[in-house]
């Protein structure tokens, strides 16, 4: 079987470089394209030069050039860029793995439309451990739906621009679905001043930003006389890279459709 040809968006960023390194080390994949925003000083440079082993793939801002040889594009950029990339990929039959966070409902709806023309795997967190944690939360929420207060606490590095994190929101969605409510109807994102007693039907969110924290997430089920905490901690972005490559392999034989990491891991 021929190697899967992968392109990376945001190639000069921290996650982009982690993905490129993982692709370069994979036996069944080859780096076939690299994208970055127009005006980036990385444009025109070799995408793998930071590894000391050039890949002979230049970083491009032009989508036609950057994706000319790609089977799959892996994208961890910003919502606006991701939508532009998804539109192009849908028009040219290029599969996508999307790990971009901060996507609004209309963004997700647009991606769903693009998935009618190409195969897309969309997930706020590519970590295998996080996605197994989501399954555990689904199971736990069904048992703790009454008599337990649910709070989601997440911590990330000082440079993260959105809050709560996409992973925290996904955790909330999984829990809300499991107990038969809509997250938008029960989520509480801020508390300040005299707030009154806690609404027992709410799902609370707390966001911490500081230092170089890669990503910590804890869901607290607090009852009377006991509390249960389900926690996942990331110490390296390499877990996201490895999960992304696993997702790309999953998409290799897919023509169209919108998938998530639960599909990739066979957890549905």
Image: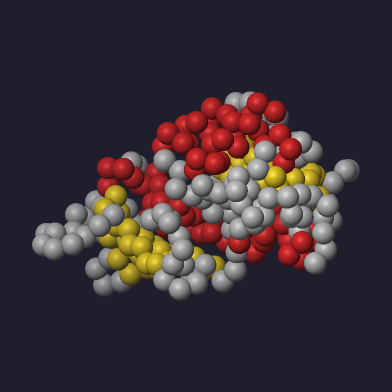
Q: In the rendered view, would you say 241 is above or below 6?
A: below
Q: Quadrant of the C terminus?
A: top right
Query: Percent x, y for residue 79?
Result: 49, 43
Evaluate whether residue 55 shows in this view.
Answer: yes
Please tell me which residue is depicted at 49% across the width and 65% down the height of the picture. Answer: 215
Q: Considering depth in this image, is 25 or 36 the residue closer to the camera?
A: 36
For image coordinates 19% across by 54% down, the residue present is: 199
At which x and y percent is residue 2?
88, 43
Up the image or down, 96 lies above or below 17; here it is above
- Choose between 155 and 142: the one closer to the eye: 155
**At x 11% / y 62%, what residue is drawn?**
194
State the count of labels.
Answer: 0
Relative image position of residue 131 (x, y in whole percent): 55, 55
Q: Can you say whether 235 is above or below 165 in the image?
A: below
In the picture provided, is 212 more to the left or to the right than 12? left
| Residue drawn at 83 percent across, 52 percent down | 56
């Amino acid at each position: 079987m021929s190697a899967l040809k992968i392109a990376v968006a945001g190639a000069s960023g921290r996650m982009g470089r982690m993905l490129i390194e993982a692709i370069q080390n994979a036996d069944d994949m080859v780096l076939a394209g690299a994208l970055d925003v127009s005006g980036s000083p990385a444009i025109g440079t070799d995408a793998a030069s930071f590894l000391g082993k050039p890949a002979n793939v230049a970083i491009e801002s032009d989508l036609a050039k950057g994706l000319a040889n790609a089977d799959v594009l892996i994208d961890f950029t910003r919502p606006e860029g991701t939508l532009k990339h998804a539109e192009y990929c849908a028009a040219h039959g290029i599969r996508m793995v999307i790990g971009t966070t901060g996507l609004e409902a209309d963004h997700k709806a647009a991606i769903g439309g693009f998935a009618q023309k190409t195969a897309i795997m969309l997930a706020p967190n590519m970590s295998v451990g996080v996605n197994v944690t989501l399954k555990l939360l689904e199971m736990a929420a069904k048992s703790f739906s009454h008599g337990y207060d649910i709070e989601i606490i997440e911590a990330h590095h000082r440079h993260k621009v959105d809050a709560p994190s996409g992973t925290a929101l996904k955790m909330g969605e999984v829990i809300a679905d499991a107990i038969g409510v809509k997250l938008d109807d029960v989520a509480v994102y801020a508390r300040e001043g005299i707030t009154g007693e806690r609404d027992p039907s709410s799902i609370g969110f707390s966001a911490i930003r500081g230092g170089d924290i890669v990503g910590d997430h804890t869901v607290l089920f607090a009852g009377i006389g006991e509390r249960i905490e389900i926690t996942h901690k990331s110490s390296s972005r390499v877990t996201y890279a490895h999960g992304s490559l696993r997702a790309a392999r999953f998409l290799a034989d897919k023509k169209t459709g919108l998938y998530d990491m639960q599909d990739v891991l066979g957890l549905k």
